[in-house]
């Protein structure tokens, strides 16, 4: 049977997710239930369906700053160990159901200490949740059989808020937990007025400790943010990085000329953690069809596709891939290329990345590619 590129067939293939925020992927019913349990009264509505619609609409303002304001509510109900563990467990289950084989999920511990938790309490609770959710996903996968869901492995990225002054402390926390499930460090938040170099001490510490880190750059601000993240701070990856397209000129015939920074990013194989739906919502791009991922993929940049915030964007990895298929006519080979790119770029040891690529990802796509080739030649 030929596997067409529809939503269900895409859901079943293994995926790799590098850019997903824990507090941006909470189930709407969980937000409502946790709010009721802890007495959080600031939600715009307690109805899960209405709440999901509110998050999607509020986040779609076209402004990164207004987009970020929606997190007040999810963070507001994630201030206890039980809440953090529940949200993390549900995150693992939801991603596995969507066919995600490996995910790096990030969160900012400093945002979850308003009711007395220590930073270590926050990290411990989230790690416990991911362990429980991954175990549940494994049981479900075994019961369902091959092709319906996946076992999932989750690596944690600890994020520091770029408008605050705790980045060195969070970086040290990431190193302290790197043998317990934390794979890297990140900074997030509004870019304008808060350049990466404001946290240079944290990045230099990570480099001295041989730690991995990514930096949100080139989403709400332009090329200077990307340049600082790479040339001053030494980022391994770029969170979003969509504004790298500002350093590329395309003539009427479609021939592209890369500026110095764009050429550096491509030639050094700097991974770009692109999040199409989120980038439309924040105004970084006007539509999926206009997203630079199409051009950058054609030019050979190491682009990856990600969800960013599944609640706010009402998306998942499957829907992001479906959108790219519709916008750019991608086939199975393109989706495999994006998936392998992400796995190559993960903050895992090289041998483990290679095993997942050769033993799971490529075999899963092989039959689909063969069927696609047969259909094309017939």
Image (spheres, rainbow, N blue to C red):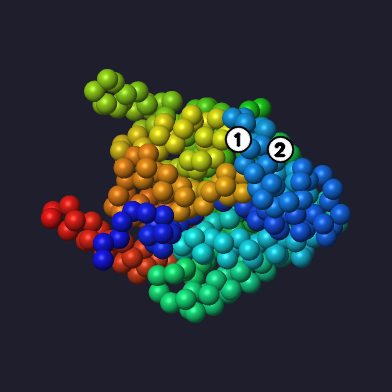
Label 2, secondary structure: give it.
Answer: helix
Question: Percent x, y for residue 11?
Answer: 43, 59
Residue at horizontal 49%, vertical 48%? 306
Q: Is residue 133 left or right of residue 122?
A: left
Residue at horizontal 37%, vertical 42%? 326
In this view of the protein, can residue 191 be seen by the observer?
no
Residue at horizontal 13%, vertical 55%? 378
Q: Who is closer to the viewer here, 306 or 217?
A: 306
Q: In which quarter of the image is residue 355?
A: bottom left
Residue 60, label in figure: 1
- Who comes first in sequence, dot 1 or dot 2? 1
Q: Who is closer to the viewer here, 56 or 206?
A: 56
Q: In this view, does 331 lie to the left or right of 303?
A: left
Question: Percent x, y for residue 282?
Answer: 58, 33
Q: Mark 2 points at which residue?
A: 69
* Crowd tier of the residue under label 1, counting other residues whose Cα lies within 10 Å: few below 14, some 14–19, many 20 or above: many
Residue at horizontal 77%, vertical 50%? 46
Q: Quadrant of residue 69?
A: top right
**Taking 46 as reference, is 12 above or below it?**
below
Question: Percent x, y for residue 315?
Answer: 53, 49
């Amino acid at each position: 049977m030929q596997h067409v590129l529809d939503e269900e067939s895409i859901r079943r293939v293994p995926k790799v997710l590098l850019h997903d925020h824990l507090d941006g992927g909470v189930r709407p019913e969980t937000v409502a239930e946790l709010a009721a349990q802890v007495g959080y009264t600031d939600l715009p509505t307690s109805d899960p369906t209405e709440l999901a619609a509110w998050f999607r609409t509020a986040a779609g303002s076209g402004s990164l700053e207004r987009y970020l304001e929606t997190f007040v509510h999810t963070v507001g109900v994630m201030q206890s160990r039980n809440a953090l563990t529940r949200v993390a467990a549900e995150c693992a289950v939801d991603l596995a159901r969507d066919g995600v084989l490996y995910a790096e999920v990030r969160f900012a511990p400093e945002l979850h200490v308003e009711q007395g938790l220590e930073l270590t309490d926050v990290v411990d609770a989230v790690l416990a949740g991911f362990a429980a959710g991954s175990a549940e996903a494994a049981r479900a996968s075994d019961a369902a059989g091959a092709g319906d869901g996946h076992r999932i492995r989750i690596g944690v990225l600890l994020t520091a808020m770029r408008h605050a002054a705790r980045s060195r402390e969070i970086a040290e926390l990431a190193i302290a937990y790197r043998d317990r499930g934390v794979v890297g460090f990140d900074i997030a938040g509004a870019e304008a007025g808060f350049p990466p170099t404001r946290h240079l001490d944290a990045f230099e510490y990570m480099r001295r400790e041989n730690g991995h880190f990514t930096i949100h750059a080139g989403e709400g601000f332009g090329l200077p943010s990307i340049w600082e993240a790479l040339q001053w701070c030494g980022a391994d990856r770029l969170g979003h990085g969509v504004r790298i397209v500002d350093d590329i000129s395309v003539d009427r015939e479609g021939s592209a000329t890369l500026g110095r920074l764009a050429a550096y990013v491509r030639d050094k194989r700097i991974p770009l953690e692109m999040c199409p739906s989120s980038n439309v919502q924040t105004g970084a791009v006007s539509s999926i069809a206009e997203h630079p991922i199409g051009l950058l993929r054609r030019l050979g940049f190491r682009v990856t596709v990600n969800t960013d915030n599944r609640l706010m964007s009402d998306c998942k990895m499957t829907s992001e891939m479906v959108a790219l298929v519709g916008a750019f006519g991608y086939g199975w080979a393109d989706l495999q290329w994006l998936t392998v790119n992400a796995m190559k770029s993960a903050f895992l040891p090289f041998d483990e990345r290679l095993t997942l690529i050769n033993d799971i990802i490529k075999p899963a796509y092989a039959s689909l590619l063969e069927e696609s080739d047969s259909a094309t030649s017939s």
